[in-house]
Amino acid sequence: MPQISVVIITFNEEKNIERCLDSVKDIADDIVVVDSFSADKTEDICKAKGVRFVQHKFDGHIEQKNWAITQAKGPCVLSLDADEALSDELKQSILAIKNNWEKDGYYMNRLTNYCGQWIRHSGWYPDKKLRLWDSQKGKWAGINPHDKFEMFEGDKATGFLKGDILHYSYYSVEDHYKQVEKFSAISSDVLHVQNRNVSYPMIFLKAGFKFFRNYFLKLGFLDGKYGFIVCKISARETYLKYLKLYRLNQ
């Protein structure tokens, strides 16, 4: 039976971390929190829960998560963000594969709670994530801040688990707007370093298509008021990312 290490990165997550830790205590053999020097009660909560707590300078989401893997006691890692938790169905799925581990990694869906409402469309669900894997057979990649775990060539035997990662994303619309400003700046900087380019008209085309895809093709209108807001702000993030890239290139 494989031992599963749960690895969580944090920064000022006193609002979320207790829920996350409580959701994994029955499936984890090892829990380690890698913190970026939080100034709130994150450390106190983690230590009260009896989990390992390590502090490490944050150099980027991808870099931090790859370093965090090295702190796990074993190779089988379940990676979560502090604002995530496991549904009861997903916990049962993970317990089942602990007795029958057959794959290099396992995908699962992520369901996002936005201002108290579960978003089941809008390009946000099903949000398939590879979050449980043999850490010797892959690494975190992608473009900051949007990271993803990628298996190495030859180690791509993956399965799918029933149940959801429950993602408690934004408690207010204002929080979403603030995050978009931050994330769009990070993304544009990375694209600029990669020598990516965009024309001025293309900025509007990309943002417009993002809204059209999420609200109409991805059925965002079925999520009601918050579906419209999610699709609008997602399009704004695309607009800002490429506008900032355009300005950097100028």
Image (cartoon, rainbow, N blue to C red):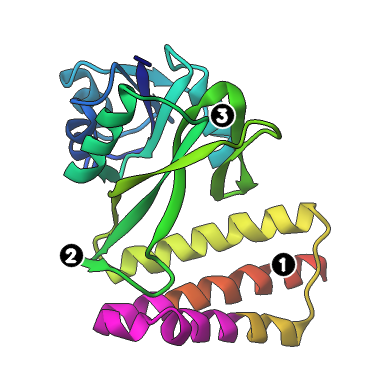
Residue range of the region highlighted in magenta in the rendering: 207-231
The answer, for residue 60, to whether it is visible in the render is no
Magenta residues, dominant SS class: helix
Label 1 – label 2 distance at C-alpha: 33 Å
* Distance from Cα at disc 3 to Cα at disc 1: 26 Å
Q: Which residue is mark 1?
A: 245
Q: Alpha-carbon neighbours of circle 2 within 10 Å: few (<14), some, or many (≥20)?
A: few
- Label 2: state its secondary structure: loop
Q: Type of residue at label 2?
A: Gly
Q: CA distance from mark 3 to mark 2?
A: 31 Å
Residue closer to the observer: 47 or 165: 165
Residues at marks 1 and 2 touching, judged by CB atoms closer than 8 Å? no
- Which of marks 2 and 1 precedes in the sequence? 2
Secondary structure at badge 1 equals: helix
Q: Residue at x 37, y 38 (%)?
A: 80
- Residue 116 marker: 2
Kindly check if marks 3 and 1 are in contact, taking CB atoms under 8 A apart as contact. no
For disc 3, the marked residue is 66
Identify the mark nearer the N-term, 3 or 1: 3
Please tell me whether residue 141 is drawn above or below residue 124 in the rendered image: above
- The percent coordinates of residue 21 (x first, y second) are 22, 31
